[in-house]
Amino acid sequence: MLWDALLLALREIRRNIMRSALTMLGIVIGVASVIIMVNLGSGATLQVSRQISTLGSNMLMVRSGQRLGFGQRSAAKAFDMNDVDAITRDIRGIAAAAPSAAQSLVAIYGNRNWSTTITGTNNNYFAVANWTLAKGREFSTSELRSGAAVCILGNTVRKELFGNQNPLGEKIRLNKMTCQIIGLFAPKGQSVGGRDQDDLVIIPLRTLWRRIAGKQEVQMIYVSAKDGVSTNKVKRDIELLMRERRRISPTEDDDFNVRDMKEIAAALTGTTQILTTLLGAVAAVSLLVGGIGIMNIMLVSVTERTREIGIRLAIGALEREVLLQFLVEAVVLSSLGGIIGISLAVATSYGLASLLQMPAVFDPGIMLLAFLFSAAVGVIFGYFPARKAARLDPIEALRYE
Amino acid sequence: MNTQAEKNTASLIELRDITKVYGTGQATMHALRGIDLSIDRGDFVAMMGPSGSGKSTCMNILGCLDVPSAGQYLFENVDVGLLSRNQRALLRRNYIGFVFQGFNLLARTSALENVELPLIYRGIPAAERHTRAGEALAQVGLSGWEAHAPGELSGGQQQRVAIARAIVTEPEILLADEPTGNLDTARSMEIMELLTRFNQEHNITIVIVTHEQEMAAFAHRVVHFRDGLVDDNTPHRELN
């Protein structure tokens, strides 16, 4: 009996190829749009969290001046090495602290030049800011102490100045200083804000002071907390210490700021999650619209189908045989539409992800949910009008206009 | 009662005081006001009468497509009034063939598939279905038209497909509600000749509803309907 119903249903689908295709189209679009949007949203979230992890977890940045708004700060006295020593000595739960000062200038090699940022710091910086060396070595103690002309390049600077050539041991010019390349960083890619993190040159802090900046300032102190230590507590301790060292009275505001990467990360993750939810909501609407499309096609064909049901009943079909046939038909159409929709969504998600340079993420839960919803709409609106018709007297069904 | 039941064993169909009422209250319409009718096996009956006289209603009751409001309907001595909806469907499936004025074929479905349909519900295997449907189409003179959908056939051809669908199951009785109502005279004659042939060669009992005297002339007897009552003056054809 089920086999016969399947046979009748398949015949019916083939017979009304246009109606079947339109019904499936509704399901295909509904299923595909939800899956694609949620996949893209999840991909964006994943990408942001990956980018955040390249910043260095547990990292805090201490800068002089107060943040006034986006990228602006008030002028204030810079830090010096005593501040760095004090933080290293007095704050508990710190893994490392790295002083730094930076300056923009043009790096020259042969006939090529590249405008970049030169940062002076020490070896602690690598661990704190999560940099790993792809080739070469860190600074030696004597290089750091004497302010030797040595540098480590980020991947972008290497590419721009050297192309495919091996830069280790070569010399580049930074202003009037000629410095030897002793190391290369592994690439990190873009930051969350879209800045190229690999566009940098690192030299010893003392070298920057003596040969480039001409003054002995620490512009920023990178601090990393030990694993399991609350960055929030470290941040408060640093703030207290700095207020004391900078003799700020209790009535005055800080003239420096401490930023916790975790807070930034949380804010960014929150934003992308909101984005994902929003995309999901938009997709849910399109699923609903797809559902209404399915419903319309099913209901529009009810006149023809009611007469057909009348014919079947008149020649001796049982109510349940007719219903089984229509149910099988709705299930076959909905499943087929769902499967096509999922395939389309997977292909499109891959395509878009590679186009947008994002990781492709697939959420099986959403796929199942979208599929079940569309299938339910298809089955309900395919089945219930049929049930109503099958309960009519055959003669009424035959006369149905 | 006993003697009467025995007396009626020869009748395929026995209607006793059948009434049919549509609607309630002010809108009540008495379609049948108490019909007595018996039809023997192998009979060929034409039902005639003006519109609204109850002949189509009577036909639908005979075909178990509709149920009477009161009265008794015996089909081969089985009281149809006691049957469930599904049992009536099975009775249609196994004993009754229908031909409608509007043909009522499945659209966009080949003639062969249309004729096969009742065999599917009877659970006949595919190979046998094909053979029998092909034979039925041949009997109505439509060999070579198996693959054509109703839209590609003339009215007369469509009605012949419908007749093939009705007789493919070899029913006890074939009910035709104005089978020639949508056809011209030449096609109508062909259809009536076809029905006559099935009546004579296969001993299928045939009941038709018609407006036209010429068509009714093919029948053994004519039952006249007037205002929901039977005006039956025609004697039963003597069997044997």
Image (cartoon, rainbow, N blue to C red):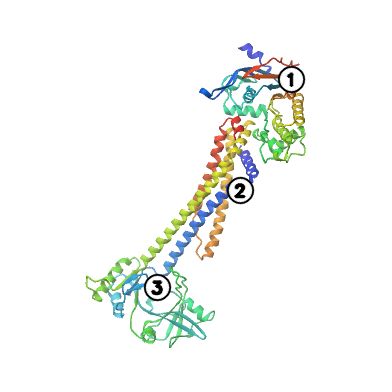
Which secondary structure, mark 3? loop
How packed mark 1 is, by other alpha carbons closer than 10 Å (few <14, some 14-19, many 20 or more), is some
Q: Residue at x 37, y 76 (%)?
A: A124
Q: Which residue carries the number 2 mark?
A: A21
Q: Which mark is residue B202?
A: none
Residue A340 location (% of width, % of height)? 58, 52
Q: Position of residue B150 (x, y in %)?
A: 70, 38
Per the model, the C-alpha gap separating discs 1 and 2 is: 52 Å
Horizontal side of B56 relative to A387 (left or right) equals right
Q: Please tell me whether residue B133 is drawn above or below residue A21 in the rendered image.
A: above
Residue type beneath disc 3: Ala
Residue neighbourhood size for the residue with mark 3, other residues' Cα within 10 Å, grouped as few (<14), some (14–19), many (≥20): many
Q: Are marks 2 and 3 in contact (CB under 8 Å)?
A: no
- Which amino acid is tagged 2? Ala
- Percent position of residue A68, x then y: 33, 71
Q: Nearer the viewer, residue B53 or B17?
A: B53
Q: Residue at x 66, y 13 (%)?
A: B7
The reply to whether residue A338 is visible in this rendering is: no
Q: Which residue is mark 1?
A: B220
Residue under circle 3?
Answer: A129
Indicate which disc, 2 or 3, sits on the residue closer to the N terminus. Answer: 2
Please, what secondary structure does the residue beneath circle 1 have?
A: loop
Q: Please, what is the three-letter code of the amino acid marked with disc 1? A: His
Quadrant placement of the N terminus of chain B: top right
Q: Is residue B76 visible?
A: yes
